[in-house]
Image (cartoon, rainbow, N blue to C red):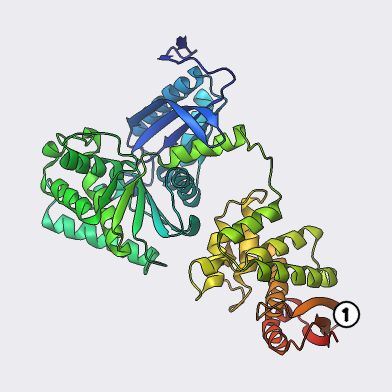
Amino acid sequence: MLQTNDRGSSTDVPPSDAGATRVAAIDLGTNSVRLIVAEVDGPDSYRVLDDEREQTRLGHRLHETGLIDPETGQRTLEVLERMQAIAEAFGVAELRAVGTAALREAANGAAFVEAARDRFDLDIEVIDAEEEAELAMRSVRRNFPLGEGAAAIVDIGGGSMEVVFTTAGMVNEVHSLPLGAVVLTERYVSSDPISASDWRRLRAAIDRELERQIGKPPFPTPDLIGSGGTFTAVASLAMQDRQGELGPVQGYSMTRAEFEHQLRRLREAPLAMRRRFPGLNADRADIIVAGAAAVARLVRRLEASRILINDRGIRDGLLLEMISRQAPAATGPVDRLDAARIFARNCRSNVRHCEHVAKLAGELFDGLREAADLGPGDRELLTAAALMHDVGYLVRHNGHHRHAYHLIRHSDLDGFSGYELELIANIARYHRRAHPSKDHENWRRVRSDDRGRVRRLAGILRLADGLDRTHAQTVIGVRVAAVASDTITVEVAANEDPWVEIGDARRKADLLEAALDQGVELKCETAD
């Protein structure tokens, strides 16, 4: 079936299955523009109808000028208009277009977005680096069995490289580095083939950025799962060498030695020869050396032994996100505190301890709500933080409160907004050790008018956690007996002498005392 749109372009459109929903995603990157059109098969499944790519080099010389070049911008707008027309010809229910590093960094990025809206009514979302990484992570979760181990999820484009550290499928850390293939090529590659001096400068620059932003990896990552044109190009070269033919690279596995061997081939060959390499797109040949160098240096730093290729990336993540809205799960929405419980269980938390801390924290909240100037919705944030405060043990014991922050913040729990998860993550982050500080990056993400109540909620959680120090539920309940001008009296009911719990709770009352500018006195009553 041939459909023609009002812009005069046409495309062969396959007939839709009865009642099937179609969606489309456009990924506007520093190097190229990609369109994918799909038909929804189920809650987490789709069938690709069209897949288009065109190199526009939107980020050409951006690092020098800070601006999108007018000629390049015009060419990119024309490509976007054509891709939008293709998507509309397929009758999609939703089209989502996102811009990444080039539009984030360009001083005239907003003007480019406005031009697309004014000229052909296309809304481009300029997503931040963390959302870009989370879309890549969503794609990986669908396509790879992450299991119980640790992995690094890496997406490299023309302008940046996103690195996500995961444990048992849970996001622990996200980093965005200015190590895109186009940016590195324009800054450090001025010879063909690359000279020894350019090669040293390129590697040194990559290593400096890795050290500055990642430093020592949070945990060993034997597997690295990579998306983006750099990964797929190197995988195609390796497949050609190993199998003598090209094929789909989705899920293809390479060793670090194989990757470095292909990088050596690329580095030693002049551009004209690289353009003839089977499996390497000619329009990527000029930037592949720098992109592959960034990946190779990262792999060495992480001491990864296996590289797995995800040929889907953020476009796949975009489709999956749209499909989740178009075709919600048949079971209906999950209660958000139940979602927190499921998440904690998946992180192998001590369920009895976390539930008990949530109970004690709720009892403290009820008695302190008025004095602490807290609202009814704050109780649910506190309960969620209590249920998940120990998820960081999934990563390691030392610093588990900091790991809990990252795991919760990137959890994408049903029912909670992104900012609510930020608040919950900060409450859990401060259930032990240091108080909130302006030196902490996570604390700077909390809006200034919310910091007081987050401190108070974290102080309540800290005290409740101390009251179950041995995880034995010796303390069976608490009650705020009195709130005086300088002291809060808390009565503690216990089955037996809770001297360990009382001692720890007294130490951990410090944050609540500082937040309320009042002392906390614990009185214990032991059941006969």
| x then y, percent, for residue 312 | 40, 39
Label 1 crowd bin: few (<14), some (14–19), many (20+), radius 10 Å: some
Asked if residue 509 can be seen in this view, the reply is yes
The image quadrant of residue 473 is bottom right
The image quadrant of residue 510 is bottom right
Q: Residue at x 53, y 37 (%)?
A: 44
Q: Count every numbered label the image shows and give the total.
A: 1
Q: Residue furthest front?
A: 528
Residue closer to the observer: 145 or 89: 145
Residue closer to the observer: 170 or 175: 170
Asked if residue 371 can be seen in this view, the reply is no
Does residue 470 lie above or below 123 as drawn? below
Does residue 449 lie above or below 271 as drawn? below
**Label 1's element?**
strand
Name the residue type under label 1.
Ala
Does residue 241 lie above or below 77 as drawn? below
- Left/right placement of residue 300 relative to residue 443 reads left
| x then y, percent, for residue 434 | 58, 78
Q: Residue at x 65, y 58 (%)?
A: 341
The image quadrant of residue 77 is top left
Q: If the image is split into quadrants, where does the N terminus sit? A: top left
- Left/right placement of residue 483 relative to residue 80 reads right
Q: If the image is split into quadrants, where does the C terminus sit? A: bottom right
Q: Residue at x 71, y 60 (%)?
A: 381
Does residue 188 lie above or below 7 as drawn? below
- Left/right placement of residue 128 relative to residue 225 reads right
Residue on which the image places disc 1: 481
| x then y, percent, for residue 451 | 67, 66
- Left/right placement of residue 162 relative to residue 440 reads left
Residue closer to the observer: 76 or 510: 510
Residue closer to the observer: 252 or 300: 252
